[in-house]
Amino acid sequence: MLDSVSGGKKTVPTYCYNCVAGPDLMCVTVEDGVATGVTPNHDGIGIHPADGRPCVKAYGLVQKTYNPNRILTPMKRTNPKKGRHEDPGFVAISWDEALDLVAEKLRGLREAGLLNEQGMPRLAATFGHGGTPANYMGTLPCLLAAWGPIDFSFGSGQGVKCVHSEHLYGEYWHRAFTVAADTPSANYIVSFGTNVEVSGGPCAVRRHADARIRGIKRVQVEPHLSPTGACSAEWVPIRPKTDPAFMFAMLNVMLHEAPRGKLDLAFLRDRTASPYLVGDDGWYLRDEATGKPLVWDTVSGTAVPHDHANAVPALEGDFTVPRSVAKLPDGETAIHQNAKARTAFQMLVEGMAAYTPEWAESVCDVPAATMRRVATEFLDNACVGQTVEVNGKTLPYRPVAVTLGKTVNNGWGAYECCWARTVLATLVGALEVPGGTLGTTVRLNRPYENRLKSVKPGEDGFMTAQMNSTRKGGWADKPKGRNAHTTLIPIVGDSSWAQALGPTHLAWMFLKDSPEGFEPPLPPDVWIAYRTNPAVSFWDTAQLSDNMAKMPFVMCFAYTMDETNHMADVLLPEATDLESTQLIRAGGSKFVEQHWAHQGFVLRQPAVAPQGEARDFTWITGELARRTGLLAEYNRAINKGFALVPLKGEGYDVTLPEDQVHDVDTIWDRVCRAATAGATKGEEVHGLDWMKEHGFFMQPFAREDWYLHPAMEEQKLRYELPYQERLMRVGEELRRRLHEAGIFWWDEQLEEYQGIPHWHDVPGRWVKAVERAGAHPDDFPFWGITTKTMPYTTGNNAGIPLMNEVAGNLRGHGSVIINASSAKRLGIKQGDWVEVSSVVGRTRGRAALVQGCRPDTVVIPGQFQHWKTPFAKDLNFPSLNTITQMSLELTDATGSGADLVRVAIAKVDGPLAGDAP
């Protein structure tokens, strides 16, 4: 596309990646060097799923660029005391002084040793939501790669705000860092709190709108009526955190009421662990010679290894196996003679027997008839046995899906929800096939850019799994990071992404108070923060801010002042979205509903010159590399591909000399050339100038590559469902290691390692947390939850007036949403000031009375209660984060928590005083 220059006016193509639903294509209108507007990029029609349209957040980027409150020069702190009520005394300094100050600190770390006396990295870094900062930080990943060990343990919301457990279990079961419905082909979707019309970006909104025209039915199950619920065929107001019971009831109906022929029996038999034989002790019975799990062959009437040629395994039944072995924890084995055995599917059937819709009605406060009907409709729409042709390949067609939203798929109950959602798809063969439940991308398994290539044979006929060792001698008794992810969370692995997906709130909590038997971690010597404001976006924000003030040296890449960089020692102003350069990947199958029919690369380029002394992030990174003595290592990392792609490949070599400083355009010109050459095997090579003109480079992405099914079939692999024998073994090994180390405070989490999950009183855990805090549950009779709004979701937009103006059209924006009948009982009227309190704090806002909310629930949209961020601090909006507990007892086995808290609500005279916590 390009510059349409007329009277000093031009149009510049770029992208918006302010949330995980990006990148969205867009254009910036520039007049006489000033950005005046944002428009769709119509060259994206037929390529971008939303035809080149960005969401509302992108339209705030002009105000973001010209925000009068921007930090436009480097600054340093002059007051050594840190804390909310301390004035940092920031003064402007030159870039040379700022970079030398930071480089001196970094060189000091290298001289002292990259790890401290506890074996933890001296350098820590925190980046914002869902990896989105990586699409704006230029070549910083190259400097991080050159550096060595870095602690990414300190979260800005990861683990407590994201869809945490789905990331871990999704990748484990079907290479799905995030999970979505195949909306373009689906006919029936059950959404448990998936607010896709808000957080899915324009691609998801467009796909679901088209699907509604086509006749899809979506059932939205959630405590309040979100925009997604309002756009759905049906809203089911469920009691918070009882979603596993609803799904267990669906499984009960499908397994105990529906005819077996309604299920995809062939898929269960051939593509899952359903026929594997389980002994009375809960472990798979295995072939003595090979160690492979046994199945009961209906042809020969004997137990044979699961991959035995021409075997037709039994799916149900009880059997006696003359001789077998079991693989026990810590490498131990047991030999069995005439062992009684049941299939894994039989274990599932028996495990779900008690969870009838009538039982679930009392738990969920949803009529049994509703749950039974939803299960039946799911089955009726599954089209078991049907196929569809996709680009010449015949694939199963199963147009039904179940999706999970935040708080449903993290915190206690998330394991049960993620398992039940995946088993519901498995029962009808709707996992990773057209119309069904799909994964998007991978972050815990390599290669990151192609999840299909991460499918590799592992043990027992399943895919490989990247787990932290729990075996004696291999277990990390000394944590490698301050959130102890390698010590406590086997399933998360040990990549940089794994650190950020560990129990990140524990890193903050342990700075204040570590549990018995666990050495309190020393704070990092240097902490770097970018596009993140955990002092507002995390929980129990008063406590977190106090812990943040303990950091010896903090360097923030700063846009405006905010609650986190208030604690900084140095502020560096980076050129923002419309002022700097970066090439990123786009298309293929990415987060949420970002399945494209194309894949390639899209460029962010300077539509306007940087304001003030703001600098391109790549320039800042190069200068830090030079001044810390890491220039050669930094350039080497660029050449290896840490900026995006390797600069050398088959038929091309555009590598950079490693002993020179390279300017921003030179680096990205080489990256553009390498990316296009690698994608086309050298047939097309386009540099930075070409990319600036055209905005993106795309190639077709095969529709069949949306689905994992062909890769699994080709390698004759099974999904590790429904029975979780490996997780049971890992859990028992972890229990032994922890107890050997004198750690017993993780025992409740260890109970989650079950072969077939069972219901436990999930919401009751929050009631008990109130009691443990020394309060009476009756004093906190409401559930406090939060929800997202599109102008703000994960977008760092709280300080942009246009976002508030647009969001003012949305019900409940900046308010406390409460059911009208509950409000009447409490004497609360529309617009009254109310205080919502918990055992850890209080927040205030105006009441928004609605019918679309359960009477026992209050909803606080967004993340606000700012006290430093310009404009946002004057809004006086409430925030659930300030009153949500961080605690071990509310942390599940994956190290995540849920946006949920027991609260009281009362009418008050006005907002909190300015100095209130």
Image (cartoon, helix red, strand yellow):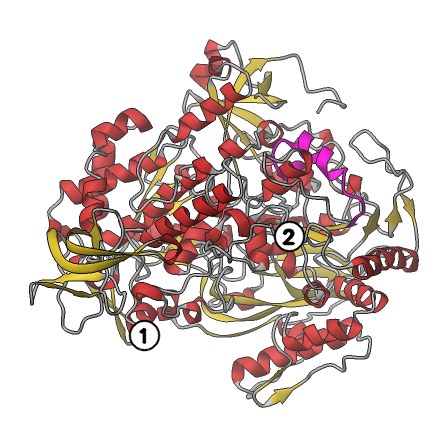
User: Where residue 292 sits in the image (x, y, percent)?
Assistant: 26, 65
In the image, taking residue 833 as reference, residue 785 lies left or right, namely left
User: Where residue 897 sits in the image (x, y, percent)?
Assistant: 51, 38
The residue labelled by disc 2 is: 152
Q: Residue at x 70, y 42 (%)?
A: 800
Q: CA distance from mark 1 to mark 2?
A: 42 Å
Residue 87 occupies quadrant: top right
In the image, taking residue 168 as reference, residue 499 lies left or right, namely right
Residue 194's label in the rendered image is none
* Relative vertical location of residue 195 with respect to residue 339 in this rendering, above or below: above
Q: Is residue 615 visible?
A: yes
First along the sequence among labels 1 and 2: 2
Q: Is residue 205 visible?
A: no
State the extent of the magenta-drawn residues as a range: 536-556
Q: Residue at x 63, y 44 (%)?
A: 156
* Relative vertical location of residue 199 with respect to residue 150 in this rendering, above or below: above
**Three-letter amino acid code of the residue under disc 2:** Phe
In the image, taking residue 379 as reference, residue 688 lies left or right, namely right
Residue 538: say if magenta. yes
Q: Nearer the viewer, residue 852 or 900?
A: 900
The residue labelled by disc 1 is: 391
- Quadrant in which the N terminus is drawn: bottom right
**Three-letter amino acid code of the residue under disc 1:** Asn
